[in-house]
Amino acid sequence: MTRKQKNQQQHTQRQNDQPQNTHPINNQGLNTQRPSAGERYYLGVDVGSVSTNLVLLSENGEVREAHYLRTQGRPLEMIQKGLADLARRYADEQIGGVGTTGSARSLASVVLGADVVKNEITAHAVAAGQLVPGVRTILEIGGQDSKLILLRDGVVSDFAMNTVCAAGTGSFLDQQASRLQLPIEEFGGLAEQADHPVRIAGRCSVFAESDMIHKQQMGHALPDIIAGLCEALVRNFLNNLGKGKTLEAPIVFQGGVAANAGMKRAFEKALDHPVVVPEHHKVMGAVGAALLAREAVQRASGLTRFKGFAMASEDVRAGSWECGDCPNLCEVIEIVESERPIARWGDRCGKWENSLSVIQTERAAEAAAELQQG
Amino acid sequence: MKVTFPHMGNMDIVVKALLEELDLEVIPPPPITKRTLSLGVRYAPESACLPLKINIGNFIEAAERGADTVVMAGGIGPCRFGYYNQVQREILVDMGIDLRMVVLEPPDNHIGELLNRIKVLTGAHSWWRVIKAIRIAYVKCQALDDLERQASRLRCRELNRGDVDRLYQSGRDAIDAASSVKEIRQCRDDALTRMAALPLDHALRPVRIGIVGEIFTVLEPYSNGFMEKSLGRLGVEVSRSLYLSEWVNEHLFKGILPVKGHHRTRKLAAPYLSCAVGGHGQESVGGAIEYAQEGFDGVIQVGPLTCMPEIVAQSILPQVEKDYDIPILTIYVDEQTGDAGLMTRLEAFVDMLERRKQRKEQAAR
C-alpha cells in the first residue's frame, strides 16, 4: 500500500470512528431523539455576566416564553433554574432544538446538549434581522459589554465590541441608580422630565461618577443630571465603538439597557434618527440562539441533541485544576454530571479535551450496542 | 558571563544558537507563564505596554536561574521600545538585581556596527567564527519561520485536533537541537513532510485572515492569547505579515539577505501614511492593503494597549477597509488572560467573513 493510500484509509477511518465537532448531529453519541409530531419549540439560552435568559421560540419564529434571570455569578445554577421553570409546562418532545450564546455559552451547551453554540454578536444580529426586517444598525448595551453591529443586506458587515471600558454599560447605570436609591426602572423615566440636561464627563465611569456627585452638590435637578448621564453614556458608546463607522437607519437598540427611555432618547438626539426598541429587547441574544438552533436542526434533518428537562435536577458541577505537564500551566475546567466528566476545556494542547472525546466515543459505541440488543 | 535574553516567539532558539556558537554560557528565561506575567505586571510601570511587562518577567526569572547579562534589541524612532532597555535596567537595579545590558541596536549606516556590538559578547573569537555563528542562528530562524507558516496554513485542515501543533513542537525541538546548517535544513524538511502527510481535509476552502500589527504581540503567542491557534481551530487559514527572519534581515542586516522585505508594504501604505511612525504602524497599514490585494477575506490588527504606532494605524484602517473592501478587526492585548472576550470577537469576525464569502461566491455564480 502506498503512503497516500494509507493516509486516505487512516483519514476515512478516523472520520468514521471519531465524532467531529463540525458534524451537525450528535457528537456526544447520546440522547438523540426525534421530536413528536405536535407543536415544537426552539430553546435559546443566553448566559451573560449579568443576566441569564431563556426563550422558547415557535416553529414560525414567535416568542412563546421569555425568562430573564439574574446570573448572580452562578451560571450553572441559573441555567438549571430556568430549565426547571420551563419543565413545569413543557415536555422533552416539544423541544425541537437548543442554541446557546453569551459568555457562558460553552458551559450552557454542555449542560443542555445544544445543537448550536454561537457568539453573542452573531446571535444578536440574527435576532434583530428577524424581528426588525431591514435593520442596518444595532446598538446593544448589556450588563458588562456593549456592541455596535452594522448589517448590509441582512449580513453583518462590521461590528465593534467595547474593549477596555465598562463605563458605557448597564452595570454602571445600575450602580448609579442604587446610589441614588432609585429603582432602575424609574431611572429612564426621570430623564425624560429633564428640561436642561447637565453635561457629565462620560469617558470613564470614575470621572462620570465624581462629576455627577459634584453637579448634585451644586444643586442641579435630579432629572437634569440623569438625562446628562444618559447623554454621557451615549457619547461614550459612540466614541468607543462608532469610530470611523457610518451608522445608517433603521437603527435598533437592544439589550437590558434599551428599557431605559432616557438612553433611547439620548441616542435619538445624538444620531438624529428614530431608534427602534423591539418588544423582546432584553432577550434578543436568546432569540438569536433559538433561531440559529432552528437552522442547525433543519440541517441535521430534524434531530436535536437536547438532553431533556431532567437536566434541571441533575447534579452538575464544575471543577478546575492547573495542569502541570508542560510550562503552559493551563487552567483546565471540568464539568461533571453525576460523577461523570462530560466536558473539559482550557488546555491549549488538547490533551484533556481529547481524553474525554475518547471516553465519549466509547460510550457512544456502548449506547449503540445497547440499542441493537434492545 | 551567563547570558539571557527576552522571549519573543521562537527567538529563544535563535539567540541561544548564536550565543552558544560563540562559546557563551546561555540561560534562556523559562517559558512565559502566568508567573512571568505577574512578575512583570508587579514591577513594570502600570501604563507601560505588554512587551515591557513580559520582558521584565523574563529577566527576573532568568536572573533567578543565575543569569548575569541580558542581550536585547534596542530601537530607534518614536516607539517607546527604544528606551525600554534602559527602563528595564533601572527597574532591575531598584529591585537589587544587577544584570548587565548588552543592547543590539539597528546599525546607523553599516553592518560593521552590529558586528562590533556582538563583538562585546564574543571577545577573542575571529570574525570568521562570528559570521559562522550568525549564519547558523539565521538558518535556524528561517527554518522555524517555515514551520510556523506551514502550521498556520494547515491547522484549519487537520482532522485530529492538535496534530499540527504536535508536529510543529517536535520540529521546533529538533531544530533547537540541530547544530549544523545541513542538519537544521534536514529537520525542517522532515517536519514539513510529516505535516503534509497528516490526515488533512484537502477539500476545505477556508476563510483566510492576515494578521498585522506590532512585532512582539504578533510574534509571541502568549501575548496575543494564542490567536493563530484559536483561529486555526475556528477553521481559518492564517498568514502573518511579519516573521522573525524578515525582521532580523531588515533591521539588523540592513536587508542584505535575499528574503522578502517590507519595502513594498511601506510603499503601499504611503498614500495613507507616508512617514515612519515608529514600531510597525506603517507596516500595519501596508500589510492590510497587501492582504486585500492577495484576496484574503479579512485582516486582524494586533497591538499592545496604549501602543502609539498601532493607534495611528488603527485610525487609518477604516479608510483602507472602505477602499479595498476588506473587513479589519483591531485587537489590543494587555495583561488580561481570560480569553472569553477574545474568542467572542474572533468567532464573530470569522462568522461575518464566512457569510460574506458565501454571498460573494453566490453572486459570482
Image (cartoon, rainbow, N blue to C red):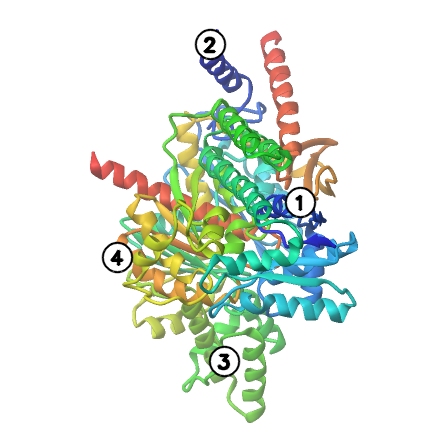
Alpha carbons under labels 3 and 2: distance apart: 71 Å
The three-letter amino acid code for the residue at tag 1 is Glu
Separation of disc 1 and disc 2 at Cα?
43 Å
CA gap, disc 4 and disc 3: 35 Å
Query: In the image, is A334 to the left or to the right of A372?
Result: right
Q: Residue at x 65, y 32 (%)?
A: A351
Q: Quadrant of residue B157?
A: top left
- Residue denoted by label 4: B323
Instruction: Give the crowd class for mark 2: few <14, some 14-19, many >=20 residues within 10 Å.
Output: few
Residue linked to disc 3: A201
On whether disc 1 and disc 2 are found on a single subunit, the reply is: no
Q: Position of residue B337 (x, y in %)?
A: 62, 53
Percent of width and height locating residue A70: 61, 56
Q: How far across and how far down the image is residue B296, in percent?
A: 34, 44
Mark toward the start of the polypeptide (1 vs 4): 1
Tell me which residue sits at (74%, 40%) in the image: A324
Name the kind of residue labelled 4 in the image. Asp
Q: Secondary structure at mark 3?
A: loop
| Residue that numbered label 1 is attached to | B20
Q: Residue at x 53, y 74 (%)?
A: A204
Residue identified by numbered label 2: A2
Tag 4, which secondary structure?
helix
Q: How far apart are labels 1 and 3 at the CA level?
A: 57 Å
Q: Nearer the viewer, residue A363 or B87?
A: B87
Judge from the rendering whether residue B310 lies leftward or rightward of residue A269; answer left or right. Answer: right
Looking at the image, do the residues carrying marks 1 and 3 touch, with CB atoms under 8 Å apart? no
- The one of A215 and B153 positioned closer to us in this rendering: B153
The residue that appears at 44% across and 36% down in the rendered structure is B153
Q: What chain letter is assigned to the residue under label 1?
A: B
Q: Secondary structure at mark 1?
A: helix
Q: From the viewer's perspective, is residue A32 above or below residue B29?
A: above
Calculate the distance from the C-alpha at mark 2 to the C-alpha at mark 4. 50 Å
